[in-house]
Image (cartoon, rainbow, N blue to C red):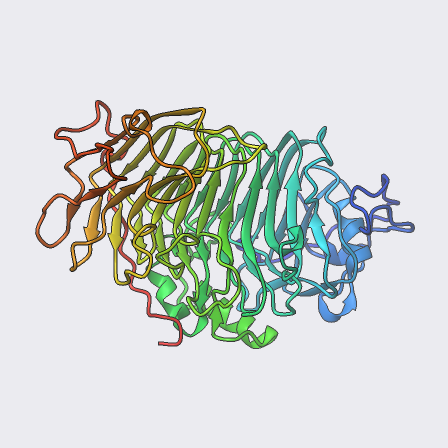
Amino acid sequence: MRGSGRPRTFTAAVVTACVLGSALQAGSAGAVAGCAQESGHWAPTGYVSAAAYGARGDGVTDDAAAVQCAVNSGSDVWFPTGTYELGASVSLPTALKLTGESDSPTPTVIRGTVPGLVLGETAAATNTTRTGTITLQDLFFDSIQVGVNGTRTSAVLERNVFSDARGHISQLNSPANQQLVLNRVIGTNRVTDSVFLHGDRSTDAVAMSLYRTTGLSIQRNVIGLELSESGRLEDWPGHANWTERSSDGTVNPSPARVSLPAKLAALRTALALGDSQGHYRSGLYTGFDSLLNVDSNIFDADPATPSLRDHAAYLKGVSGRFTRNWIRGWPNAAEGGVKVRNSDGPLTVGANRLVDTPVLLYVYSDPTYPLTLRDVDVCANVLEVATHDDPAHAGITYYENVRPAGLSGIRVHRNTFADPTHTTGVTAGQLAPAVLSQTEADAITVYASNSYQDTGGTVPVTVPAGITLAPVAGAPASDACGGLTAPSYAARAYGG
């Protein structure tokens, strides 16, 4: 809670038995007997302190039962600065806010002691009748999954940091490899101004996993970071929203303001984090999400990650916008970049800067998803090309491994290729087993406005023999990327 350094007043003595329901998550703290709220623990207005229910935040005591009591109290919960060790999962049985102390140089950490623990719920089938909004803000989650789901629930996550110092977010090809899971949340949903860190080279981590969300905005987040360069976050758009504020909400003019890099430095020391915190399989993994808005994020993976890579953003069955993101560290190959698969649209992939990694458009055989790709704009992206090891997947590529049931309205326009060799461009239907038909090629419009950065010349379009797909003059009737500009971001290479 911002402004928690203001003069504190103490609550009246209250000792209340918590009314606790059954556990909502298998293995969670769930129902806890003997909960009581103690007096003498300050919290902002409208909140109860986790300490009032016995949470110590000393980095040693198992605070799981105390935290479960606090979240089941019916009040929003404030966490004073400290490290809260959880030896069991904690469910979130009602709409509430969990807020950490933000004006201390020491972060407020919620930490799992063993693998497989969850704060909230990650299973898509649970809590489908819950209503309200779950808000998590100004918290540092380490070695524990965070999840919100429910068909009538909103999720708001602001100014959080996710890390995995103990290597618990690490189970190969398992749902337990996802740091943040949002399932079936609807309404005003957002994940903003947060940082995702993962330093285990041998594991298979995913920063965010989504399923059937509606209206979710993912904005100004950082996925992957070289901690020795965290001072560069001062130039990151989300950093401004970590500015400390006084109790009336105005910006605190004090020179003692605690910056995010300072907090990350404290976290690095406390948890013994290594420099490279960008070992990710995927930054964002989606499925059937509608009205999704992914804007102005930094996806910065360590290219030395030896485990399986599966795209910076994997957009399956999605509608919405993926715009103004800065992407680096995934290969310029089939497993890299931004992948759009089996979508009915509308979807815009626009004004992103992709550093040596591609945009991939796929129709792929899968009984779960429709065999369609419709109403997709790929526009105003900047593709910086340095490697040419997999030319069939570099640049902007359309691929199918099955005849699509519906292919229409695919528009590729105003993309800029920074490739001094002038060999990367737009590719369609070049890979086995399926071969692009002329009917399918006619569903794809590649405009002559796709150009090389140095000369302005039109990029080539490569298709199978006998197929015609030539760049066309003009522009789409409606420019889905109008007014958008790809971001610039000065990040040094990992280990650089």
**Foreground residue among 463 and 88:** 463
* Residue for point 78% across, 45% down: 25
**Residue 34 image position (x, y, % from top left):** 91, 51
Farthest-out residue, front: 466
* Residue for point 72% across, 70% down: 58
Q: Which picture quadrant has residue 380?
A: top left
Does residue 319 show up?
yes
Q: Quadrant of the C terminus?
A: bottom left
**Residue 73 image position (x, y, % from top left):** 78, 44
Q: Decide: is 187 above or below 251.
A: above
Instruction: Count the marks.
Output: 0
**Residue 449 image position (x, y, % from top left):** 15, 38
Q: Which picture quadrant has residue 4?
A: bottom right
**Foreground residue among 186 and 400:** 400
* Residue for point 33% across, 30% down: 437
**Residue 144 image position (x, y, % from top left):** 67, 58
Q: Decide: is 55 above or below 467.
A: below
Does residue 97 show up?
no
* Residue for point 41% across, 54% down: 336
Q: Which picture quadrant has residue 373?
A: top left
**Foreground residue among 64 and 445:** 445
Image-based side of 249 in relation to 480, left or right = right
Image-based side of 487 in relation to 89, left or right = left
Image-based side of 436 in relation to 406, left or right = left
